[in-house]
Amino acid sequence: MTDADAILRGEAAGLGFEVVGVTDVARLDGAEAPFRAWLAAGRHGDMDYLADRAERALAPDALLPGALSVVTVAVEHATVAPPHVPDGRSGRVARYAWGLDYHVVVGARLEALAARLEARLGRGVHARALVDGAPLLERAVAVRAGLGFVGKNTLVIRPGRGSWALLGELLVDVPLAPTGPGPGGTCGACVRCLDACPTAAFDAAFVLDARRCISYLTIEHRGAIPVELRPRLGPWVFGCDVCQEVCPFNRASRPAPWPELRPEAGVGPALDLVATLALDTDEAFRARFRGTPLLRPKRRGLLRNAAVVARNVGAAAAVPALDDRVRFDPEPLVRAHALWALAGLDEAVARRAADWALAVDPDDGVRAEADHVLAAR
Ligand code: B12
Ligand code: SF4
Ligand code: SF4
């Protein structure tokens, strides 16, 4: 171990990074075939940025001229939480989003790590912190650095600790000793995640069709949620944890070590659907979710999700808010999903709202949804 390696370990630990690996910046050749096959099959849906930047995602050295090493970190975010109790008005939030936005939280500590490396090494350090924001196959990097293995649910699993961890990287122009390959690991004969996925999103072990994944549909997807998948969302209003909750490697979870990632720091595990559907302006939405990952789908996306989940969980208390959304929401996406939700919650209100929409709504998609509501008797 060189001085630089020892300094990295010490400073990273001081900043709360418990799991740190290092790999070189060589191209991620081993990941290329599955990644390109995944893209070629269209499994990325409308995440065009993944296809547009595919070559760069395989080449860590392209992300920082002069880079020599990639420091890769895994930050645990799991929290022992009371089991979800259906209360007829709450939607579930995926664990990674319970606290503050990890892009900012992990990114800030990686920037601090770069500054400390520079100070301790006594020379300028070119560095770039990445947390899910740049085109880099972060899982392939983590595996090469020995942090864990890829499970059949496609997540990086650390034997003994599981998959409740977020990945981040610090590219540096400092030569550091690679830490991989790790002890490895395997799922063995287990297929729990593949069987448990509510939308049957796995085409095979290790192959996820994002277009069916609830995480994609509720966070990344910008358009309408396919009608046949809406009931399958169940209570998940933002992200989904099912394929990790069933994983035997995740039995040993503990509170997230970083306070920023704990539920008290952000929205926590449950979102009140009635209150969410009452967020009628972008300003109100931003004020409610400032600093959290829930800003990502924007107001229109989150209210779309909330409408679907309101129907799924039988949220009768959300009927007045849904009726308001059909009549007054500026976003056709929200109006259409609110109509769909009303149709499952209160037929009389749904029919009145549909009549109203057919008479005055300028959007073809909303009127089509209204037709559908009126036809379904
Ligand atoms: C696009 C994306 C998504 C998409 C697609 C997910 C997917 N499985 O590809 C959607 C929106 C669905 C998604 C969902 C989630 N995501 Co996401 N996502 C990403 C992102 C931005 C890119 C992933 C990507 O390029 N996928 C394309 C596929 C082909 O690439 P890949 O899965 O990395 O491919 C590798 C393996 O599958 C493996 N592989 C492929 N075939 C085979 C076959 C065999 C036999 C083997 C052994 C391996 C193997 O090799 C490939 C190269 O390493 C990354 C961040 C990043 N920049 O990497 C986060 C990331 C993967 N997501 C993350 C998280 C936390 C989630 C969610 C858990 C969030 C949630 N709770 O809702 C879910 C989990 C769903 C799931 N089961 O994957 C974390 C994962 C952390 C971890 N421990 O692994 C990441 C790394 C973000 C981060 N910085 O922490 N995500
Ligand atoms: S996150 Fe949910 S929907 Fe997506 S693959 Fe996992 S279990 Fe399926
Ligand atoms: S649930 Fe089973 S198959 Fe799926 S990732 Fe965990 S160990 Fe692997």
Image (tube, helix red, strand yellow):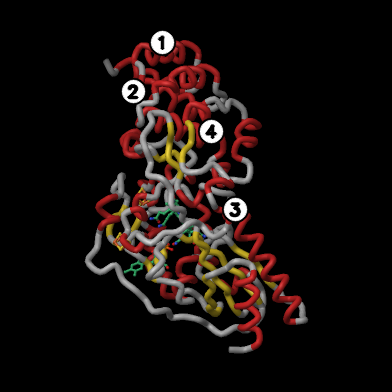
Amino acid at circle 2: Gly
Would you name the residue on which mark 1 appears? 352
Residue 346 on image: x %, y %: 36, 17
Q: Can residue 36 be seen in the rendering of this structure?
A: no
Q: Is residue 52 above or below residue 345?
A: below
| Mark 3, secondary structure of its residue | helix
Q: Can residue 289 be seen in the rendering of this structure?
A: yes
Picture residue at 24% right of the left edge, 63% below the top: 190
Residue 341 on image: x %, y %: 39, 25
User: Quarter containing ligand 1?
Assistant: bottom left
Callout 3: CB less than 8 Å from ligand 1? no
Q: Quadrant of the C terminus?
A: top left
| Mark 4, secondary structure of its residue | helix
Quick check: marks 2 and 3 in contact, CB under 8 Å? no
Quick check: marks 2 and 4 in contact, CB under 8 Å? no
How far is mark 2 from mark 4, CA to CA? 20 Å
Q: Who comes first in sequence, dot 4 or dot 1?
A: 4
Callout 2: CB less than 8 Å from ligand 2? no
How far is mark 4 from mark 3, CA to CA? 26 Å
How far is mark 1 from mark 2, CA to CA? 14 Å
Amino acid at circle 4: Arg
Amino acid at circle 3: Glu
Q: Who comes first in sequence, dot 1 or dot 2?
A: 2
Would you name the residue on which mark 4 appears? 300
Would you name the residue on which mark 2 appears? 344
Would you name the residue on which mark 3 appears? 260
